[in-house]
Image (spheres, helix red, strand yellow):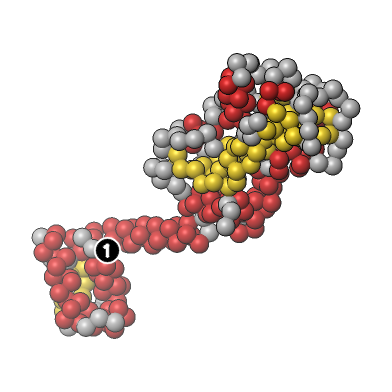
Amino acid sequence: METRRLHYFVTIVDSGTITRAAELLHIAQPALSQHVAALENEFGQQLLVRSRQGVQATAAGRSLYRYAQGILRLEQAARHDIENDVSSPSGTVTVGIAPYTTFSHQIIPIIRAIRSRYPKVLVRAIETLSVTHSQAIRQGQLDAGLIYDPGIVRGIRFERVTTEELCLVVPDGWKGPEGVVDDEVPVESLVPMEFVMPRSEHTLRRRLDSAMFELGAQLRVAVELEHTYPLAEAVSARLGAAVLPRSTAELLFGDTEHRILRIVQPTLPVTLSLATAEDQPLSRAAEVVIEVLREFTLQR
């Protein structure tokens, strides 16, 4: 049954004549009569009684009229909601932010832009989780993540934001590693040092673990810290050194009394990416938030 025909039927009953209804609907009268006949055939009931004075609904027609009004109201409400969802999306969108990245600094301008464009969207930004961010995206806990790229993960799409080399950060005057030349430090000089690091599942930590393993050594972690901004205080308090991409190191330590040393022999590149699910449907709110994330972070 077409809702269009229900709309025609309701208009005929409200108008009292097929002629008047045809004028209101901008439809030829014979065509409108054919739609009524099609409805009567579908229900197997006479719906209208015609006379010189016009038309009146039969008992079956009055029942159809009541239900048709409800169906048409629901259709109108659905169209309204769908149109609003496109033009003014609403809902909660959860974004994961990997600690020890510049994303923690960028997220407030990003949220400000989202709020300006889509005031009905609530952004929930999460830096730490009980699982890795890529796992959380697969499980539907996150709509998107600004994270260290861990490599191929089934079901996750990674869009590269940037690739950077890792740097060592130590306070000025603190006995640092041996072998520093021109603000560069070889990986093997990091072996005896202690570090402030995120937990072992974090991609940055795994990158350092792998580098130590290649040297037959073990990464020495003095403090596990999951949040970005307390890291600067922890390193200043000499609880351990930090290893960060240069942009993050300069953001957190560039204006302070710390040394930022490029790690070499070998260099340790890491990639920061925007991560989203490949095969999970997204709400309209999530779609627009991800577009803003791309706008603010992806290289052009």
Residue 299 is situated, as x and y percent measured from the top left of the image, at: 58, 53
Q: Residue at x 49, y 31 (%)?
A: 135
Provide the residue designation for mark 1: 3
Q: Quadrant of residue 235?
A: top right
Sort mark 1 into few (<14), some (14-19) or many (20+) by Cα contacts within 10 Å.
Answer: few
Q: Nearer the viewer, residue 272 or 115?
A: 272
Tell me what residue is drawn at x 54 percent, y 46 percent.
160
Which x, y percent locates residue 190? 71, 23
Looking at the picture, which amino acid does disc 1 mark? Thr
Who's the residue at 78% across and 30% down the image?
180
Q: Can you say whether 206 is above or below 251 in the image?
A: above
Corner quadrant of residue 26: bottom left
Residue 188 rendering spot, x and y as whole percentages: 68, 23
Q: Residue furthest right?
A: 173
State left or right for residue 234 relative to residue 56: right
Secondary element at tag 1: helix
The spot of residue 86 in percent (x, y) is 47, 59
> Can residue 188 be spotted in the picture?
yes
Image quadrant holding the C terminus, namely: bottom right
